[in-house]
Image (cartoon, rainbow, N blue to C red):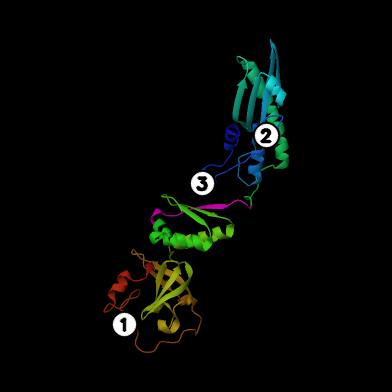
């Protein structure tokens, strides 16, 4: 098993390119040759068939040696008797480009350089012959993972946003896992690994996480939801956890009252006008207004002396710590 593992490990993708643990079980029901080299060939074919993006197929062959004085015979793909009665068991595994694993057992004092080179050349011919047959069955790894394999997706987030994905006491991350059925692991460098039994569950979890960590872009249009209505406008959630202020002057080209235009829970299309240094977001709906949808305001305008905040003479704390920006 160790020899076969060394042989096929060399062609596996590394690190973040393939964040899986691979387990291969080789069951040899009968053998009159090298079971370890059969394991190499079978494991390589199995991994390619499972969709593991290996760099190539790996084949293996067991070489033998019969030596009587100066007479030498190098044997390819030795049988059980040739292994038992011969002088060498020399296993060589590799790809079309080279050797990935090698093991030698000898019963004589040693072999000369010439014998070793001859055995390696003969082993190469045998490996390439086996590779041709393997490639005829599976020329390259499947483009998709096996439907029975769990899906693992990797995404990167800023390290200062990790706590928002986790939430207080792990509330947010547990909620995502319960809602989508995935498992989420977050590393200190911002690597987020999502394991799911199907692609749809993974995509749902990724969408939620992207919504948590995304940043509002000035000029971008969002389909938001009205969270709270004030005299001076409405707070609109443009994506989960992030609200912006839709000032009453940006609702319509005409003077309107926010409470007469929207109610909490309404969906509204807005464009981000500005994100200030404190992260507070200004929104506009003017360009998306449907003609005649909003009734004209009656009475005096709201008592606010600036766009983007509540009146200065009341509720001043809301302007500093209210629900604008990321919650």
Rounded to the nearest angstrom, the CA distance separating label 1 from label 2 is: 84 Å
Whole-percent x, y for residue 220 in the image? 47, 66
Q: Quadrant of the N terminus?
A: top right
Secondary-structure class at tag 1: loop
Whole-percent x, y for residue 177 in the image? 49, 60
The extreme bottom residue here reads 299
Rounded to the nearest angstrom, the CA distance separating label 2 from label 3 is: 30 Å
Q: Which residues are magenta?
A: 147-160
Residue at image position (36%, 89%) is 299
Secondary-structure class at tag 2: helix
Total marks in image: 3
Secondary-structure class at tag 3: helix
Residue 107 covered by magenta stretch: no
Instruction: Please name the residue that numbered disc 3 is placed on.
Output: 16
Rounded to the nearest angstrom, the CA distance separating label 3 from label 1 is: 56 Å
Instruction: Please name the residue that numbered disc 1 is placed on.
Output: 303
Residue 150 covered by magenta stretch: yes
Whole-percent x, y for residue 280 in the image? 36, 67
Residue 26 horizontal side relative to residue 237, left or right: right
Whole-percent x, y for residue 90 in the image? 64, 24
Residue at image position (72%, 41%) is 137
The extreme left residue here reads 313
Q: Quadrant of the C terminus?
A: bottom left
Counting other residues with Cα less than 10 Å from the Cα at mark 3, is it few (<14), some (14-19), or many (20 or more)?
few
Q: In this view of the protein, can residue 96 be seen by the observer?
A: no
Residue at image position (70%, 38%) is 134
Disc number for residue 38: 2
Q: Nearer the viewer, mark 2 or mark 3?
A: 2
Tell which circle, 1 or 2, labels the residue nearer the N-terminal end.
Answer: 2
């Amino acid at each position: 098993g160790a020899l076969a593992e060394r042989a096929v490990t060399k062609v596996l993708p590394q690190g973040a390119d393939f964040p899986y643990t691979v387990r291969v079980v080789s069951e040899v029901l009968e053998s009159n040759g090298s079971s370890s080299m059969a394991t190499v060939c079978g494991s390589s074919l199995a991994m390619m068939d499972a969709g593991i993006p290996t760099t190539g197929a790996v084949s293996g062959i067991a070489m033998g040696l019969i030596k009587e004085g100066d007479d030498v015979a190098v044997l390819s793909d030795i049988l059980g008797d040739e292994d038992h009665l011969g002088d060498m068991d020399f296993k060589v595994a590799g790809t079309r480009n080279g050797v990935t694993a090698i093991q030698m057992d000898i019963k004589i004092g040693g072999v000369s350089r010439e014998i070793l080179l001859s055995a390696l050349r003969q082993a190469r011919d045998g490996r390439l012959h086996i590779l041709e047959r393997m490639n005829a069955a599976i020329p390259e790894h499947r483009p998709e993972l096996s439907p029975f394999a769990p899906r693992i997706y990797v995404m990167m987030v800023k390290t200062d946003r990790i706590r928002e994905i986790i939430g207080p006491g792990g509330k947010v991350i547990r909620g995502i896992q319960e809602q989508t059925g995935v498992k989420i692991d977050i590393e200190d460098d911002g690597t987020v690994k999502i394991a799911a039994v199907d692609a749809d569950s993974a995509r749902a979890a990724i969408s939620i996480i992207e919504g948590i960590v995304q940043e509002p872009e000035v000029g971008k249009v969002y389909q938001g939801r009205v969270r709270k209505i004030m005299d001076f406008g409405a707070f609109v959630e443009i994506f989960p956890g992030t609200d912006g202020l839709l000032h009453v002057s940006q609702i319509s080209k005409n003077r309107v009252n926010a409470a007469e235009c929207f109610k909490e829970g309404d969906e509204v299309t807005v464009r981000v006008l500005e994100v200030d240094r404190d992260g507070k977001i200004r929104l506009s709906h003017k360009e998306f207004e449907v003609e005649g949808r909003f009734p004209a305001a009656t009475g005096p305008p709201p008592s606010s002396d600036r766009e983007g905040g509540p009146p200065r003479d009341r509720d001043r704390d809301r302007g500093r710590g209210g629900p604008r920006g990321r919650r």
